[in-house]
Image: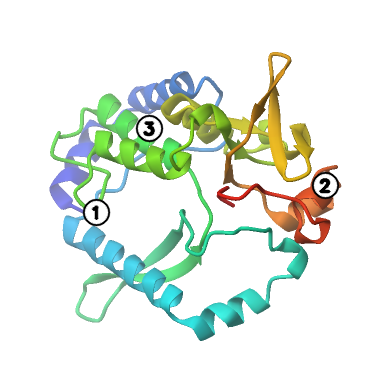
Amino acid sequence: MVPALRERFNRDWTPAAFARLQQRLSERTGLPLPFPVSETPCFFPRPLLTEMCDTAVSLVTGFLADAEARAAAEALIPPRYLGPDQEARPTCVQVDFGLVRTPDERLAPRLVELQAFPSLYAFQHVLAETHREVYQLPATLDAHLDGLDGASYLALAGAALRGGHDPAEVVLMEIAPDQQKTRPDFALTEQLWGITTVDPQDVVVRGRTMARRVDGREVPIRRIYNRVIPDELERTGHPTTATISTSSGSGIPRGTSA
């Protein structure tokens, strides 16, 4: 969408370079990629990215400030899916946009989906870095918003996910993580921020405390970077299902991110 960048990229692109991109991503993650990667990055003009960012912030803050809308949304959630000690404001929010062309030929964002759920925070950063490395993109290009660069993004995201806890006591929780297509992101989350991925059925629960086993010892879990979908957890019949639902009387420790 930035003509000069698009023309240069298309002119210089080769199948060999794309193969290097995929190989480099596999090397960085330590895994074969279980999903296709686009043959090209997108080159969005900064004003469009700023508009998308501003719109996302407006949508999220507007919803959080609307008590009636929040109550209506929460009323749709089955009580058994409402874990204890949930955050008043979500740490992670995803806002997905589609782009439309307006009558005056301007590209404008339109909301597709908004969800308080984390996704690919490590992989997207590494993907942008790898595109820049393999295709030798101009140093002026950046994949980060709001004045952040690579280093400040990693610091901010890491601090948010760890929440002031020792990363050894923070986990990324996902059902059958080795079977998920997003497992490259799990590997990079551990590389970048020291947060290990665990399956709910591998968590040791005693009353209102949780732990994971490491080399024969139990390491406390103080905070959960949660990717578990409650109804999926229920369908799998994992033995921890009753433990982390509100009907159990126990569950996620206070201060844990859900």
In x, y percent, where is residue 158? 40, 37
Identify residue for label 1: 44
Residue at 56% in and 24% down: 32
The secondary structure type at the circle numbered 2 is helix
Where is residue 203, by image quadrant? top right
Q: Which mark is residue 78?
A: none
Q: Earlier in the sequence, mark 2 or mark 3?
A: 3
Q: Is residue 236 visible?
A: yes
User: Disc 1 versus disc 2: distance between alpha carbons?
Assistant: 41 Å
Q: Indicate how the structure is coloured in the image.
A: rainbow
Q: Which mark is residue 126?
A: 3
**Foreground label between 1 and 2:** 2
**Foreground label between 2 and 3:** 2
Number of numbered discs overlaid on the protein picture: 3
Identify residue for label 2: 236
- Nearer to me, 217 or 36: 217
The amino acid sitting under disc 2 is: Thr
The amino acid sitting under disc 3 is: Val
Query: Does 240 appear above or below 13?
Result: below
The amino acid sitting under disc 1 is: Phe
